[in-house]
Structure formats: C-alpha cells, structure tokens
Image (spheres, grey):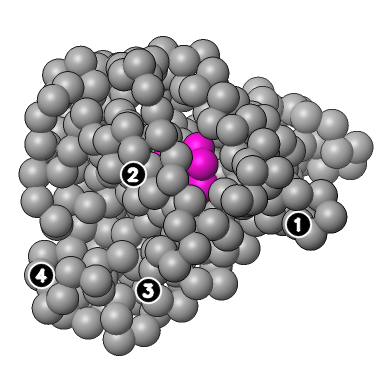
C-alpha cells in the first residue's frame, strides 16, 4: 500500500545519513534502519532506535498530490528523527528536565541539514518566522518557562515551542560564539565524553567550553531564565579620533516566577558599512554582550559608518 509514495522519504534518509557523516563525522551504527509509516499515529514521529515511527503525513508523498512544502517538511522530519540516533539515543537525557538537550540540539541539526541541502536564507526566514510567531508569544504569556524547566504537572506540557525552537536558537548561539569549526569540535567532544550515557545540559555546555577554551559559565542563564531579552543599539562616530562607538543594551521583561533577570551572554554579529557608499569597511565579527549595557569601539575609521547587525 502506498509504495509509490515512499521514494522521497528514502531519498531524504540517504541525504540525512550522508550529511551527518560529512558535517559532523557521525556515522550510523547499525546494519539496518527502519522507517514505519502509520496512518493513525497521534504524533508526528518518534525516534525509536533503529525503528523510527512516523505519521504517514510526514513520510508519504507523490507529485500529483503533494506540495513543495510537503516535500520539504518530510525531508526535514526524516532528517530530524535520524539525527536523534546520536543526539537523543546514543547520548540521551538524564531526566525529563533536560529535554531541550536532545530536542533543541536536534531541531538545530535538522535546520542546518535543510539549510545545506536547500536554500539557507529561505530556511532561516522560515525558522525565524516560526520563533517570532509561536515562541515569542509563549515567552510573553502566563506559560513562559525556561528551555530547561524546573517543574511540570504533566509530561505532555514539556513539548513546547520554548523547549524545541528556542532551544535550537540557544544551540545556534553556541555556533555563533565559537564558529562553525569550533561547534563541530565541541559536538565531537560531547559525543566522545558521553557516548552511551544519560547526561545534562550542563554536560553539553562544558564540552563546548572545554573544546574551544572559552568561558560559558554565564551562558547557563539561557537555561535557567525565561523570557525574550530586548536588545537596543546606539552608535556614535568621533570624526576627530576616527572612532566609532557602538553601545549595546539588553533588558528582559519579568516572567511568572522571575521578576528580576540577570544579563544574558548574547553573541551579536556586527559589521560596519561606509555611510556614504554602503561598502564594507569592517568585516562582520562577533561581539559578546555580557552586561546590561556595553560599549564596543572600532578605530581607524576615516569616515562615518553605519552598523550592520
């Protein structure tokens, strides 16, 4: 039944396996991999080791009835569940409070997969629209919670846009801080240390820090504080000194149970453009905002500039 609709799912799985080997050096560890499509499965998909179960809506497609969005969604979800073989199965969560450890990381991995095999700008726009349209609302309401919640009434309540999508954006900030190669070093160290173990978000953060020789202690606040921080930027050019000063400030509104917020560790990628021509004057670099307000200076500038943030 529906054999004529399985080709795209199989092709997506092959792409996923190849991508994970090339991007992160992660190979599949069994001789057989099964995908089961179920008409009445009440979830999207489940990453059981070697036997992934999917709703047919996320596996079956043919050109006469499926749209481009259907094909892209299937490719993404097939990849997501396959990537769980490492980030979720071989290395899993110590407890439910660490759920974003596997889901935020794997959402990030499937976003990167879709970006590499498709259009990176289009995928990024879609991801940002989803975060702004769903997670920002959740973070601003009575159900606001950190990506690593401290309590729950029912486990079903844990599967939120915050845990998944904001969790993926937190993982993306690691890559922004340490770079693409640094992120791979950190991920390799994480799997090397914890293969076959049940671990915590702190273990992941420690592997990233140790593999790259950086201080990520303050970065833990992304796991413990809820809410969406608001960033503001103000620039000033000193013509006499040839110096441009950029002041970045952050503030996070109160959320239920957290009236006061400590400053987050936020990477901000900034470049400078010539104010008159728009030509690049200073290549993009990553600034690290750690305080409520910080000023960064750029010298050796003979003419006014505008920031590209």
Q: Earlier in the sequence, mark 1 or mark 3?
A: 1
User: Measured along the vertical axis of the image, is residue 166 above or below residue 88?
Assistant: below
The percent coordinates of residue 196 (x first, y second) are 13, 25
Residue drawn 56% across the image and 72% down it: 133
- Label 2 sits on residue: 47
Q: Is residue 115 visible?
A: no
The percent coordinates of residue 116 (x first, y second) are 64, 29
Q: Earlier in the sequence, mark 2 or mark 4?
A: 2
User: Would you call the spot at circle 4 few (<14 residues within 10 Å), some (14-19), or many (20 or more)?
Assistant: few
**176 or 28, which lies in front?**
28
Give the spatial CA distance, label 3 vs label 2.
27 Å
Give the spatial CA distance, label 4 vs label 1.
41 Å
Residue drawn 51% across the image and 14% down it: 22
**208 or 251, which lies in front?**
208
Give the spatial CA distance, label 2 vs label 4.
25 Å
Asked if the stretch drawn in magenta spans residue 285, the answer is: no
- Label 4 sits on residue: 151
User: Would you call the spot at circle 2 few (<14 residues within 10 Å), some (14-19), or many (20 or more)?
Assistant: some
The part of the chain drawn in magenta is 77-81
User: Measured along the vertical axis of the image, is residue 13 above or below residue 173?
Assistant: above
């Amino acid at each position: 039944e529906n054999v004529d609709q399985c080709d795209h799912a199989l092709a997506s799985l092959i792409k996923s396996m190849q991508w994970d080997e090339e991007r992160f050096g992660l190979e599949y560890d069994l001789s057989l991999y099964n995908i089961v499509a179920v008409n009445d499965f009440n979830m999207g998909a489940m990453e059981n080791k070697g036997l992934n179960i999917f709703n047919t809506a996320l596996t079956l497609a043919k050109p006469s009835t499926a749209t481009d969005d259907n094909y892209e969604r299937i490719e993404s979800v097939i990849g997501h569940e396959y990537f769980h073989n490492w980030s979720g199965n071989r290395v899993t969560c110590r407890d439910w409070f660490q759920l974003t450890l596997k889901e935020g990381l794997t959402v990030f991995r499937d976003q990167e997969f879709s970006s590499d095999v498709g259009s990176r700008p289009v995928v990024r726009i879609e991801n940002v629209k989803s975060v702004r349209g769903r997670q920002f609302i959740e973070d601003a309401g009575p159900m606001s919670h950190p990506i690593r919640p401290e309590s729950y009434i029912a486990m079903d309540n844990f599967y939120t846009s915050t845990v998944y999508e904001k969790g993926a954006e937190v993982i993306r900030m690691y890559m922004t801080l340490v770079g693409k190669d640094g992120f791979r070093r950190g991920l390799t160290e994480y799997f090397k240390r914890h293969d076959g173990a049940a671990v915590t978000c702190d273990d992941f953060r420690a592997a990233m820090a140790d593999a790259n020789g950086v201080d990520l202690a303050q970065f833990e606040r992304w796991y413990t504080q809820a809410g969406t921080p608001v960033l503001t930027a103000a620039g000033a050019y000193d013509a006499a000194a040839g110096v441009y000063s950029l002041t970045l400030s952050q503030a996070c509104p109160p959320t239920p149970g957290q009236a006061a917020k400590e400053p987050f560790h936020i990477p901000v990628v900034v470049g400078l453009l010539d104010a008159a021509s728009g030509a690049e004057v200073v290549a993009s670099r990553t600034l690290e905002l750690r305080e409520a307000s910080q000023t960064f200076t750029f010298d050796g500038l003979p003419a006014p500039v505008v920031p590209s943030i």
